[in-house]
Image (cartoon, rainbow, N blue to C red):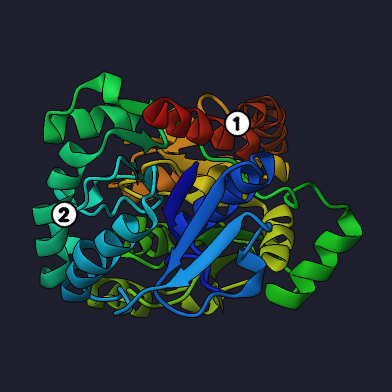
Amino acid sequence: MKIAVNTRLLLKDKLEGIGWVAYECLRRMVKSHPEVEFHFIFDREPDPKFIFADNVKPVVLIPPARHPFLYIAFFEFAVARYLRKIKADLYLSPDGYLSLRSKTKQIAVFHDLNFEHFPQDFPKIHLWHYKKFFPRYAKKADKIITVSEFSKKDICECYGINPEKINVAYNGANEIFSPVNEEIKNEIRNKYSEGKPYFMFVGSLHPRKNLARLFTSFDLFKKRNNNDIKLVIVGSKRWWTEPIKNAYESMTYKNDVIFTGRLSAEDLHLVTASALASVYVSYFEGFGIPIVEAFKCDTPVITSNVTSMPEVAADAALLVDPFKEESIAEAMEKILDEEVRNDLIEKGRIRRQDFSWDKAAETWWKVCSDVVM
């Protein structure tokens, strides 16, 4: 069997949400099925660490798919031509981009449809491409894999897709995420937060991550509470918009906000495990991997009561209204109570058992097998 896979988001030192999902699931699928010939399709020279086993054949197609017009050239022509050339039995796309011109059976992994609900958060050219092509990808796909029941329902309602066409595979978290002792916590605080306790946020600094309200909420929390708690922001400023910048600049306590930039998985683990709490108050998520990462580190979680986040967190987090700074600030105050923190940690230990990359990879493989067989 030949399975071609869109692996353009497997980028050395630049793995983000969808890239990590692809990495974790594909690594397991490849090693579990040595009888299958996997063709990994890159748009630039791949790092050898992404060639997971001898049954992976990497290929670089052009042009690099980093702009909506280039997406069309890459997926509709280069990919279609390659699938035809190798006579692929299946094309699997972890970021949802299919090839409408190809007759090969195809599976799309859709993580969320945030662009359908918050179009104002996207550059116009990218929004045009998403809204033009993703409804067509949804109809073209032989099967769709998504990451939550919320996203499944959203895809069905937005694009009129039969629910039986969609399989849910919950994401997991990297195996390195685990609790650390007090000595390590002190070391990490000394390194990142001037030795002080801290709330943390991790993610791409995109408008939907709700950073502007997070900054305002943290300011409100600090004004009400005489403490030395910091706010550590992990992620690159690629989407640092004017509203986010203005919210930060207008803070009274902006000197208590610490930006680390992107961190390696190892450093992110230590920062997560040493935090007073993870504050993940996006207003739209298809899943929310940082919630599970925090659970695995025995770190309490504050997250939003909208989209997929209540589904992922269940009763193991403080749920807030992400559109109300007051709600977020109140949760920060509650987390100062040791009994509240300990209760959330215990519930997180139970909830985290429902999420693993092994389970996700098994679902991916079952869907692939069902389509091909």
Looking at the image, is 263 positioned above or below residue 177?
below
User: Is residue 90 shown left or right of residue 127?
Assistant: right
Q: What element carries label 1?
A: helix
- Image quadrant of residue 183? bottom right
Residue 121 spot, x, y in % from top left: 20, 63
Q: SS class of the residue under badge 2?
A: loop
Mark 2 or mark 1, which is nearer the start of the sequence?
Answer: 2
**How many marks do you count on the picture?**
2
The relative height of residue 244 versus residue 75 in the rendered view (above or below) is: below
**Between 285 and 367, which is closer to the camera in this rendering?**
367
The 10 Å Cα crowd at callout 2, few under 14, some 14 to 19, many 20 or more, is: few
Taking the spot 69% from the left edge, 74% from the top edge, the residue there is 192
For disc 1, the marked residue is 359
Question: Looking at the picture, how far across and down is residue 117, in whole percent?
Answer: 16, 47
User: Which residue corresponds to the image point at 61% horizontal and 40% vertical from the top-left?
Assistant: 357
Q: Which of the 4 quarters of the picture holds residue 164?
A: top left
Do the numbered discs 1 and 2 sit on residues whose CB atoms are within 8 Å? no
Q: Nearer the viewer, residue 203 or 174?
A: 174
Whether residue 336 appears in this view of the structure is no
Q: Identify residue type, mark 2.
A: Arg
Which residue is nearer to you in this view: 164 or 55? Answer: 55
Q: Crowdedness of circle 1 by 10 Å Cα count: few (<14), some, many (20+)?
A: some
Query: Label 1 is placed on what type of residue?
Result: Lys
- Residue 114 is situated, as x and y percent measured from the top left of the image, at 24, 49
Mark 1 to mark 2 CA distance (whole Å): 32 Å
Camera-side mark, 1 or 2: 2
Q: Residue at x 59, y 41 (%)?
A: 172
Percent x, y of residue 21:
51, 50
Residue beneath the point at 49% across and 61% down: 40
- Residue beneath disc 2: 101
